[in-house]
Image (spheres, grey):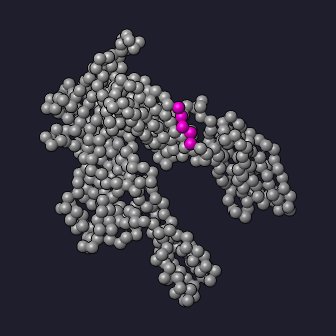
Amino acid sequence: MISKRKFSNKYRFIVLLLLLAGYNTLAAQPLWSTKQQVGERVVFKDDKVRNKYYYGPGKLFLSTDRDGKPVFQLIAMRYTGTGLAGTKGEKRFTNLLQFSVSMKPVSTAELESLRKELKLPASAQLSPLPIRHLESVIVSGVGRPGADDSGRIRKQTGSQDQGDTAPGVYWTERTFTVPLENHEAQILWDQQVNGRVAISLNYAFYANVLQYDAQDIKITGDSALVENLKGGIGEITQDTVLSSEIVSGDVLNIVVDAEKYPDVFKKIDINENSIPPAYAALEVKCFDFSLDVRPDLAFKSVEIEGTSVTGQPVLVKTKFSQKLPDVTNKFVSFPYALRMDRPLRYRVVEVPYDGDRYQGAWMQIESGANLVDATTPQKENPVDKFCLDIEITPEYMEENAVLEASVHFLFQYEGRERTQTLSLSQAEGVWFKNICVIYDKEKPLRYFITKKYKDGRTGKGFIRGMPKDGYVLISN
């Protein structure tokens, strides 16, 4: 369906044919406006396929092994420096929280219940909703009201993304490996001493859905025109927007009995004679896109390399992008055990919208550190973004016989002088516009105004510096 349109003559018939040729038929997709809650599941209808439905993910629960033991570990590793290494007396710590969660599977009985509630015919298709990604936060401990949160853990466990172009998957189990700072780990160790560890996992599932409001097509005109167009109406598809939306979420309370399962809590002292391999995990942060400090970049990739127990390099990657600006931290874990006596290193790869990708130098990660900050340092950030609001009043244009006023934006980007122009005219009937540019910070922004008058004259104003408030009222 598309917005209401009227066609009253042969010229509009030609326009409609062009529209029919230009629309793309979308693949089958869940439609956001059809969302409904049925029992514990959210359900969507498909946009194109009749009698096709998608059911959302089930609730999460802590995974257990075949003996009923929770798949959960809290590990604290301490390294004491040595005289040989020149670090005598230093103590460094690495703390890891690792646990697995499973999704409640859909049973045959639940599927039958969904069909009954939705009043679906036997031929209807009921499929799992492809999950785009999972956002989650762990919370534990008790903060003091009106004071700091030193007694509480609140840590984002990262965005477990399927990729920018992935259609989505329906998974059944996920493992979280989360590095903890010393005070965060201490909160859990204090709970362990008291016999129980309690953690809340706040989570939300995202899926790709179609956003639009269906509307009917109305065609008017002579009978021959209407008859000719009837056959093409079914081929028209809505100009839609595919977006990633929260489809469901909940809180999972994780309680582990420390007295019953004491071996899930481990403290390891590492010395110069015994450095066991470990599955390293790090937190990676990047605020370039959430703070809009690098508008020139499409995405930024962080590569982390370690050494496996066989001596071979092991590489893991994670990515931050303009498409998901709110994702500022991710947790990266290595799939293989690494030699902890060998340093880890990382590098940042920047991919701009135009131009060649930039691959940074390898940087060594300090021993015991579990954080990589990939945010561009402000002193090294070569570009910035500036937005300007332009306004003119219709009274001013009428009184001064102005047909069109234009603001010419002068700036430098990637070492080249550039110009962008924004025009306001009586014919267009728009009196306010906005323009944003990315520019090299080392060169100042400037602008000038030109005008066209009803009597054919033209005028050009002086070149001026950009106003700090980002607003220009054309009034003289």
Instruction: Name the residue nearer the viewer: 161 or 104.
Output: 161
Residue 185 x/y as whole percent: 30, 27
Residue 317 visible in image:
yes
- Estimate the x, y position of residue 476 in percent, counting from the top left: 79, 49
* 174 shown above or below 125: above
Total marks drawn? 0
Is 405 situated left or right of 146 in this image? Answer: right
- Name the residue: 49% across, 31% down: 362
Residue under the image location 23 percent in, 54 percent down: 105
- Position of residue 27 measured from the top left corner of the image (x, y, whole percent): 42, 65
- Asked if residue 278 is among those painted magenta in the image, a careful observer would answer no
Majority secondary structure of magenta residues: loop
Residue 280 in view in this figure: no
Give whichever of 340, 195 is nearer the camera: 340
* 252 displayed left or right of 319: left
Answer left or right for 252 relative to 386. Answer: left
Q: Nearer the viewer, residue 176 or 276?
A: 276
Residue drawn at point x = 68 percent, y = 56 percent:
431
Q: Is residue 59 above or below residue 336?
A: below
Vertically, is 452 above or below 154? below
Residue in the foreground of this view, choosing between 359 and 165: 359
Left or right: 93, with 386 as reference point: left
> Is residue 359 one of those drawn in magenta?
yes
Tell me which residue sits at (26%, 53%) in the image. 58
From this view, report whether residue 18 is shown above or below residue 174: below
Can you give x and y, in whole percent of width and height, for residue 391 in the image? 69, 52
Residues shaded magenta: 357-361
Q: Quadrant of residue 376?
A: top right
